[in-house]
Amino acid sequence: GSGLPAGVFPSAVSYAELSVALCSDDYIQSLNAEWRGKDAPTDVLSFPQDAFGDLLILGDCVISVDTARRQAREVGHGLLDECRVLLVHGLLHLMGFDHEAGEEDAAEMAAYEDSLLALLLG
């Protein structure tokens, strides 16, 4: 299986697209201030799009390489692994998951993150 619950993708979707941008802390801070009202850098931001018939455009996932590098050092793994973690995290946000909605939602999102990372690294 995909590691995701049934119904996450509409059954009519034949193609899904995701845009990924790597940037600096300065750039992601400007996006965070503009879109979330938080004037501070963050690790990843997700900007959802929409579906057009059988084409699903998930949206944009913006990752700060500066923050990813710091976080990778803190947890003791490489930058590439941290970027994978952030990409999966951002992707799940684009699919409607929200760890800030409560403990149960956070636990559910964390389980899917683990499942998708296992598929990526498997």
Image (cartoon, grey):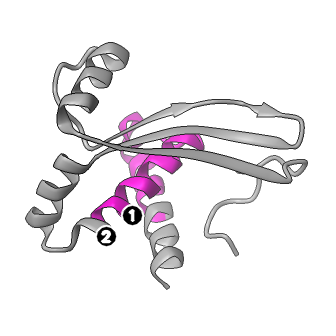
Compared with residue 61, is residue 111 higher up or lower down, i.e. above or below?
below
Residue carrying label 2: 81
CA–CA distance in space, label 1 to label 2: 5 Å
Magenta stretch in the rendered image: 82-111
Element on which disc 1 rests: helix
Magenta-drawn stretch, dominant element (helix, strand or loop): helix
Which amino acid type is marked by label 2?
Answer: Asp
Q: Is residue 72 magenta?
A: no
Point out residue 12 in the picture as x, y percentages from the top left corner. Answer: 90, 48
Q: Residues within 10 Å of mark 1 (few under 14, many from 20)?
A: some
Compared with residue 112, is residue 49 higher up or lower down, i.e. above or below?
above
| In front of the other: 96 or 66 | 66
Point out residue 40 in the picture as x, y percentages from the top left corner. Answer: 16, 26
Residue carrying label 1: 84
Residue at 75% x, 59% y is: 6
Residue at 39% x, 49% y is: 106
Which quadrant would the N terminus be assigned to in this image? bottom right
Residue at 69% x, 39% y is: 57
Q: Are marks 1 and 2 in contact (CB under 8 Å)?
A: yes
Q: Is residue 100 magenta?
A: yes
Element on which disc 2 rests: helix
Horizontal side of residue 115 vs 80, given as left or right: right
Question: Where, by quadrant of the figure, is residue 78 drawn?
Answer: bottom left
